Image (cartoon, helix red, strand yellow):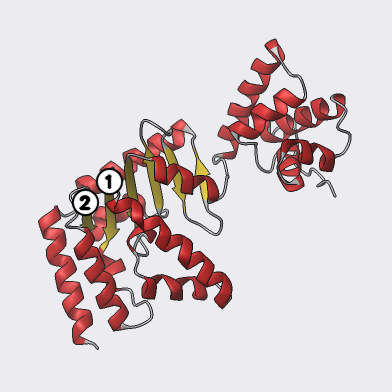
Amino acid sequence: MPRVNSRNPERDPAAFLGEQLRRVRIAAGYRIQDSFAVAMHVSQDTISKAETGAQPPTDDVHALWMELCSVTGGELDWFRAALTLARNSKGLVVEGFEPWLTIERQASFLRSWCPMLVPGLLQVEDYALPLFLAMGKGREKAADLLAVRLSRQDILAATEAATGVFLIEESVLHRLVESPGVMAKQLGRLLAVSELPNITIQIVQGAASLAGMFGQFDIAGGDEVPDTMLMWAVQDQTTHDKVLVREAIMIFELIRGRALNVEESRTILMEARAQWHSQQ
């Protein structure tokens, strides 16, 4: 059933865009969202969120919407501008995690800021699984999520592997996940990965991490994909918004400029691993 739009189109650019998307959909003969969703090969929820302004459409969805509704010329230019305004007003273009998997594999560089947990690309199985279970996932679902996470990690050692820079807040090394033995194993993994020629791991101590305390984020980009940011929250949020990605890169480089160098970071990792070993 279509969502009731509680947003004010006169004040919310995303809601105003949604009204216009609904207008051209109906004018094109798609009187109900379900039939339009079938023609678009997307879920009815995607159509509903776009038309209420809850979630502006992605570039691909927007382009197909315009094509199916025969929007051309000056009206098409208007819709493109309205989409940009709607995204800016929302702050984030929420696309979920699936698009990130493709972007991550095609990227030539990766940046990751991690103030709470070891980044997923560097997690060992015994560290990752308890995290999924702690999130309330059932055993079967947690196993599926774990398989996806572990399968992502082969990009670090691929023939043409991306260059990765991982900034990890020092407290992450001392935050117990499952057991001291698991933590020692996880830190051993970080030390091993840090020896790969394409990977840099730097530890961030104390006040140097304050610029990134609003949360964890990853950035990927390269010749084949636009600069893209994934923010980790209750729901993973992926955005190509140039302003937001540029701001995240600025924050990342600010943190990195105050992080320990590679050798100092390896020393901290070895010391933390030794501490966990002593607690087994």
Q: Amino acid at mark 1?
A: Thr
* x and y percentages locating residue 84 in the rendered image: 58, 27
* x and y percentages locating residue 238 in the rendered image: 51, 45
Name, please, the residue furthest toward the bottom: 280
Residue 173 lies in what quarter of the image?
bottom left
Residue 171 located left or right of residue 92: left
Specify which label sits upstream in the sequence, 1 or 2.
Answer: 1
Q: Quadrant of the C terminus?
A: bottom left
Q: Does 44 sit above or below residue 135?
A: above
Q: Which residue is the site of mark 2? A: 200
Q: Amino acid at mark 2?
A: Thr
SS state under label 1: loop
* x and y percentages locating residue 249 in the rendered image: 34, 39
Q: Which residue is the site of mark 1? A: 159
Residue 204 lies in what quarter of the image?
bottom left
* x and y percentages locating residue 230 in the rendered image: 46, 47
* Observer able to see residue 116: yes
* Observer able to see residue 137: no
Residue 67 located left or right of residue 1: left
Q: In the image shown, does 84 or 66 lie closer to the viewer?
A: 66
- Identify the residue at image location x=14%, y=54%: 262
SS state under label 2: strand
Name, please, the residue furthest toward the top: 73
| Front disc: 1 or 2 | 1
- Identify the residue at image location x=12%, y=65%: 267
